[in-house]
Image (spheres, rainbow, N blue to C red):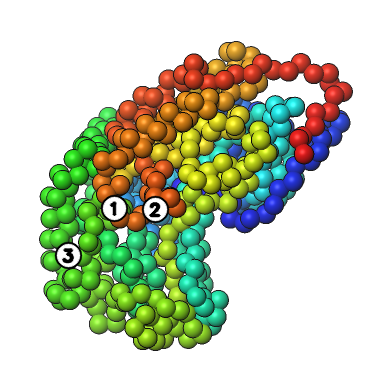
Amino acid sequence: MLSAATTSNASFSAPRSVPRGGEIEHHHVAIIGSGFAGLGMAIRLREAGEHDFVVLEKANDLGGTWRDNVYPGCQCDVPSNLYSFSFAPIWSWSRDFAWQREILDYLRACAERYGVVPYIRFDTEVLGARWDEASQRWFIETSRGTLTADVLVSGHGGLSAPSIATLPGLDRFRGARFHSATWDEKADLRGKRVGVIGTGASAIQVVPSIQPEVGRLHVFQRTPAWILPRLDAPFSERKKRWLRRIPLLQRFDRLFLYLVRELMVIALTRRPSWLRWLERLARLHLEGQVTDPELRKQLTPSYSIGCKRILLSNEFYPALCQPNVELVTGGIREVVENGIITNDGALHELDVILLCTGFNVWKNPMIERVFGRDGRSLGEHWADSAEAYLGSTVAGFPNLFLLSGPHTGIGHTSLVYMIESQIEYVLGALSALKRRDAAVVEVSHATMKAFCAEMQIRLSGSVWNSGCSSWYLDQNGKNTSMWPTFTFLFRRRAKRFDERVHCFEPRRRERADDAPRLAA
């Protein structure tokens, strides 16, 4: 799950010119979002000696997706020691897989420890950003005014824009309804008739958490998921003492977790047939927890394991077996004032509807708010499919860097590893700009196209492209999300900033009284 930066669809109109007298605030680097990506970038900038930057955060607190997702049972599905910054290890996790609150507290502690809180501009939503060719900088309009920056880094994250199911009649429902990412903490579900739409990553945590307190729980499933046991256990006090006293042990544990998970890449990308043993484990898990053969049949996927996100849970199947729970698989026809009517004509009366329907990964509002050299938005450039070199830079968008962009997704390990790799790429670009005394850096169009073509070739035999429908694929069925090989190979490519495949522009020496103008 990644930082949240913006949610509204406000239009953006850049100012026609830079006011004389320096009225517009300017920074060398502007960062969007304060989740793992935004904070990681800010911390590394400060460590590199850069202090002229600002972090723009729409909310009144940092944390991104771990701030926003407060639904019951919210927990990470990557081991705690791996799902953290490599430069900020922590020994005090409560268990192998951390709870949402722990991760949020960890991010807050990192921000405090590395002194980046003063750089964060809270309650500042980015409404738009436009590249100005004349002044060689980004004009950024926010909910609190306009500022400019030489470099723009977007860490808005792919899990920041909830996907609201387009169900006929949803607005007619008279009861409470909300998405798992916008959980209503004041909602009282005790004794209520609750409908959960979806059986993905958030649903399998929500359902067992609320099942004991609700009166009746209807779980609406479109496609079942492959679910593996969560090998989770509390960190013992003895383990914490050893990790605290011998930091090397924690680094060894992190390396071990990383290497074990990295072995899965071979099966996911090159030998999908090797995943049969994992599928067998998932079937045994299902058979061991669900005794009803009809329910078990409904919960058995028809696609290869790994084609969609593999989920972890020890509680979801037992919750579905409880007498106050019904799994509904017939499909939703419409939502009415007092519930949901399925395709078989049955009415499921409800007091509350919970939308566990995921996120708009590549239809995030932010991509419609960033405008490049030609005046077109990133969303317009990506109308067919998202393209970026190393998931970080896009031709036609100078001095723009994306964190967790296209082809940085991974289905086996920690996204934080990929984010840290991209941050090194950004630092390399900034260093190249300074060394050349240049104002602009931009990846060449040919390099970006060649990289994206390489990704499609490498992904063609992967399990993610094996035929099912998932968020990994865009509207055209193209996989623009996943990195198709070992993550250490991504880090190797990102760590060495290759100046040969980038275009640089020298700094323009304009008169101080010249007011550069934005293109219409």
User: How many labels, in total?
Assistant: 3
- Residue 284, position as x, y percentages in the image: 12, 61
Report, in whole angstroms, how far the alpha carbon at label 3 lies from the one at label 2.
24 Å
Residue for badge 1: 467
- Which quadrant of the figure contains the C terminus? top right
Report, in whole angstroms, how far the alpha carbon at label 3 lies from the one at label 1.
23 Å
Q: Is the Cβ of the residue at disc 3 closer than 8 Å to that at disc 1?
A: no
Quick one: 105 or 141, which is closer to the camera?
A: 141
- Residue 200, position as x, y percentages in the image: 34, 61
Quick one: 134 or 42, which is closer to the camera?
A: 134
Quick one: 278 or 502, which is closer to the camera?
A: 502
On screen, 404 above or below 431? below
User: In terms of sequence position, does the residue under pointer 3 or pointer 2 come before the other?
Assistant: 3
**For the residue marked with disc 3, what is the amino acid?**
Leu
Q: Quadrant of residue 484?
A: top left
Q: Is the Cβ of the residue at disc 3 closer than 8 Å to that at disc 2?
A: no
User: In terms of sequence position, does the residue under pointer 3 or pointer 1 come before the other?
Assistant: 3
- Residue 339, position as x, y percentages in the image: 45, 83
Q: Can residue 370 be seen by looking at this rendering?
A: yes
Front disc: 3 or 2? 2
Disc on res. 286:
3
Q: Is residue 18 left or right of residue 259?
A: right
On screen, 228 above or below 415? below
